[in-house]
Amino acid sequence: MLRRILMVTAIATLAACGGGHSSPTESKSSPPAGTGMTMVQVGDNFFSPQSIQISSGQTVQWTLTGQMTNHTVTDTGGAFDSGFLSRPGATFSHTFTAADAGKTFHYQCQTHASLGMTGIVQVR
């Protein structure tokens, strides 16, 4: 009986935590003056705009505007990963540094990449 109670408690805890996946940190602070921020919408199975060009030092903020909460913003090269966006309105931000200048970052939703949920950030 005790074993069953522990099992139910463990399952309930995992469900409450989103299955063990970390949630993105929501940035409350503004980027440094002069760097600017570029916004990308995370819809249900799409990013909009899908491709952006930014300058090094700029921050990109992705905001979940769709209703599905199983989307991620994951760079295919491992430079950034939002984890699962937990609720409509959740945000994930990444600042691209001078070391990123001249690079192109291909990112995707880990759950929906096969449906074409991909995006590109080109850093000047």
Image (cartoon, helix red, strand yellow):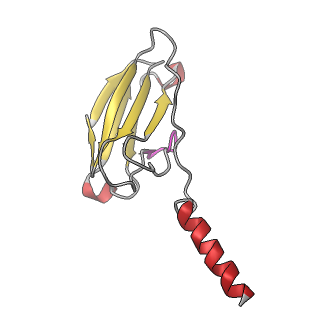
> In this picture, is 27 found above or below 116?
above
User: In percent of the image, x 31 and y 46: which residue is there?
Assistant: 118
- Residue 12 position by quadrant: bottom right
Q: Is residue 120 visible?
A: yes
Instruction: Return the residue found at the far right.
Output: 2
**Which secondary structure class fits the magenta region best?**
loop
Q: Is residue 103 visible?
A: no
Along the viewing direction, whichever of 102 and 88 lies nearer the viewer = 88
Q: Position of residue 115 (x, y in %)?
A: 26, 57
The image quadrant that residue 102 belongs to is top left
In this picture, is 31 found above or below 21?
A: above
* Quadrant for the N terminus in the image: bottom right
Estimate the x, y position of residue 103 in percent, counting from the top left. 42, 28
Viewer-nearest residue: 105 or 6 = 6
User: Position of 36 compared to 7: left or right?
Assistant: left
Residue plotted at (72% across, 86% down): 3
Please provide percent x and percent y for residue 13: 61, 66
Q: Residue at x 38, y 58 (%)?
A: 111
Q: Magenta residues, as a range?
A: 74-81
Q: Position of residue 8 (x, y in %)?
A: 62, 79
Magenta span includes 7: no
Residue occupying the far top of the picture: 34
- For this orientation, the residue located farthest to the bottom is 1
Position of 71 relative to 55 (above/below)? below
Front-most of residues 97 and 12: 12
Quadrant holding the C terminus? top left
Residue at left offset 59%, top offset 73%: 11
The answer to whether residue 4 is left or right of residue 92 is: right
